[in-house]
Amino acid sequence: MRTVDWVERAIRIIDQTRLPAELVSIDIREVDELVVHIRSLAVRGAPALGVAGALGMALAACRSAERGGDLDADLAVAAEKLVGARPTAVNLSWGVEQLASARGGGAGVEELVKAALAIRDADIEINQALSDRGAQLLAGARRVLTHCNAGALACVEFGTALGVIERLHAAAPLEMVYVCETRPLLQGSRLTAWELGRRGIPHRIIVDSAAAGLLLGGEVEAVVVGADRIAANGDVANKVGTVSHALAAGYAGIPFVVAAPESTIDFSTESGAGITIELRDAEEVLALAGHRVASPGSTGWNPAFDVTPAALVTAIVTERRTIDGRADGRDAGGAGSAANPG
Ligand code: MRU
């Protein structure tokens, strides 16, 4: 089953809020419903959000045609709602913009659907290509650590950081993947561990705060994560907690690799300081699995992402190139220009 797909002029998603207990899908026929499911993280992860954004615009076009609406006005309303659903992952606005510009170029409803399906299909090939590149870069690493979920569940059917891990495992069995549980919503322990388990890849879930000690203790040979937005200078926004792993990896002299498609690079944002970090409901921090555990009356703060400075990134691997983390993201770089982690 694909994480996000197009079935009978509706969007079909795996409901990730129900995993790992149940593998169920939801069919979405209206943009407003899609926005609710994006906000609740039923569909999540930067590449999946990019595809959801593009398919969301196709959905708006189909409904507009069925209702005899004004296509341009309906697409403008849909675009605003979709882009506003989650602010940090640039892929969401990228997917929406791809469709808006197709419409600007004169595309009708059927061409818009085709354009969205092409974005869906390209996601699979792109992630396979960047995963191959990442696995070449980290060849030989047998004990790796990852954060959040950058697997098939964050994309269409093949992951980014977890794609690299799968490719490494296919080349020579991995000894251990350390999976940070990823508080507060547990994308690591719920989703990444589920994906690794299905693929028979050995893994252990750790609390996020165990990672630094593990890295400094020499247990891990590489850290590989995904990204939600990469600024032009190479600063990387990813799930909150990522920068702690980058700091520890840097101190321990372990490669810290970011695996992401080119569409995650936002050349219009100069540095990480310009990236909007989504602030989510503090209740997610104050509760565990929906039950309040924090001291009554205490308040919380819940940024969903943090920014890792480019100086802490060994390399960014995309489908086209390997970028030295310390180089300017606008530099075309090219394969082989990354710092050699070996
Ligand atoms: O809040 P989420 O679950 O959407 O956050 C996802 C992440 O931070 C992922 O690491 C990132 O989107 C890359 S997914 C290939």
Image (cartoon, grey):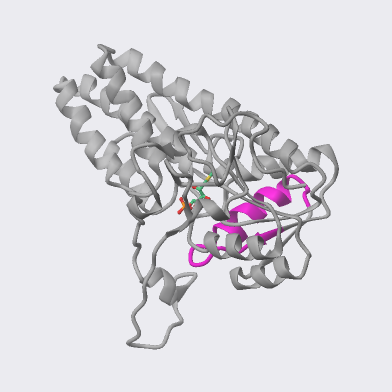
Q: Nearer the viewer, residue 210 or 192?
A: 210
324 to 106, vertically: above or below: below
Asked if one can make out residue 21 in the rendered structure from this viewpoint, the answer is no
Q: Residue at x 66, y 55 (%)?
A: 193
321 to 228, vertically: above or below: above
Asked if one can make out residue 8 in the rendered structure from this viewpoint, the answer is yes
Q: Residue at x 55, y 57 (%)?
A: 187
Point out residue 190 in the picture as x, y percentages from the top left corner.
59, 58
Q: Is residue 287 magenta?
A: no
Point out residue 239 in the picture as x, y percentages from the top left corner.
49, 56
Total of numbered circles in the picture? 0
**Quadrant in which the N terminus is drawn:** top right
Q: Is residue 105 left or right of residue 287?
A: left
53 to 298, vertically: above or below: above
Q: Residue at x 66, y 36 (%)?
A: 131
Point out residue 340 in the picture as x, y percentages from the top left corner.
72, 43
Say which quarter of the image contains residue 108: top left
Q: Nearer the viewer, residue 205 or 306?
A: 306
Q: Residue at x 42, y 36 (%)?
A: 50
Q: Nearer the viewer, residue 196 or 122?
A: 122
Point out residue 37 in the picture as x, y percentages from the top left corner.
37, 47
Q: Is residue 37 left or right of residue 31?
A: right
Q: Is residue 190 magenta?
A: yes
Which portion, as a residue range, is magenta?
Answer: 178-201
